[in-house]
Image (spheres, rainbow, N blue to C red):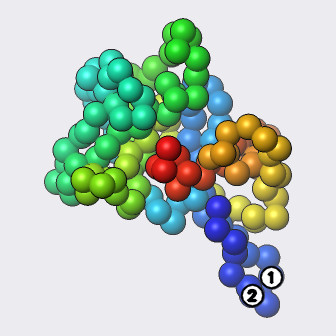
Amino acid sequence: MSAPAESTDGPQRTRAVTFELQGEHYCVDSSRITSVLSIGDCTAVLEAPDPWYAGEISTDDGNIRVLDLSRVFESATRTLDRPEVPKLIVFDVTDDDGAHYGWLVDDVGVSRQIDPQRLERTAGGMSFISGTVTLDGHEHLWLDEASIHES
């Protein structure tokens, strides 16, 4: 998460998009998100051998490289409870071939203004988790999208 700009107008806020994976709550800075798509038939993506590169989806705006975050975060032996119509969060950053990165997730919530001072840093663990923030009584893991795309 980038540092907020200095201001004399009170606390700076960052807009984040909330989403769910296997019943867990997450959020990511929305400034790099270009769209959220519903994915009707994603059988090929769900059966891809590599969750970090679960295939590509073509749209009018170009190709999207799909990362299946549920499979990245869960044990390989766990059975995943998938929704009928998962969502794809599409980012403006592209891979070496010019395809946009897209995260396959279970559901996408609303965009929220968050005070970065509320972010509680986590010790150790995965490099792409910036910390946690509590929203509406649920702890959300704040993901660093740049770190995930570098993996």
Residue that label 1 marks? 10
The residue shown at (64%, 68%) is: 2
From the top left corner, tell me how far across and down residue 118 is, in percent. 82, 58
Left/right of residue 28 with respect to residue 124 in the rendered view? left
Q: Is residue 72 above or below residue 122?
A: above
Badges 2 and 1: C-beta atoms under 8 Å apart? yes
The one nearer the camera, 140 or 44, is: 44
Residue 7 - label: 2
Please state which amino acid type lies under the numbered disc 2. Answer: Ser
**Label 1 residue SS:** loop
Q: Is residue 69 above or below residue 145?
A: above
The one nearer the camera, 127 or 120, is: 127
From the top left corner, tell me how far across and down residue 14 is, in percent. 65, 67
From the top left corner, tell me how far across and down residue 121 is, in percent. 81, 51
Residue 26 - label: none
**Label 2 residue SS:** loop
Residue 50 visible in the shown view: yes
For the image, the number of numbered tags is 2
Please state which amino acid type lies under the numbered disc 1. Answer: Gly
Residue 34 visible in the shown view: no
Real-space CA distance between mark 2 and mark 1, rounded to the nearest whole angstrom: 7 Å
Left/right of residue 64 with respect to residue 32 in the rendered view? left
| Residue density around tag 2, few if under 14, some if 14–19, many if 20 or more, within 10 Å | few
Left/right of residue 31 with respect to residue 86 in the rendered view? right
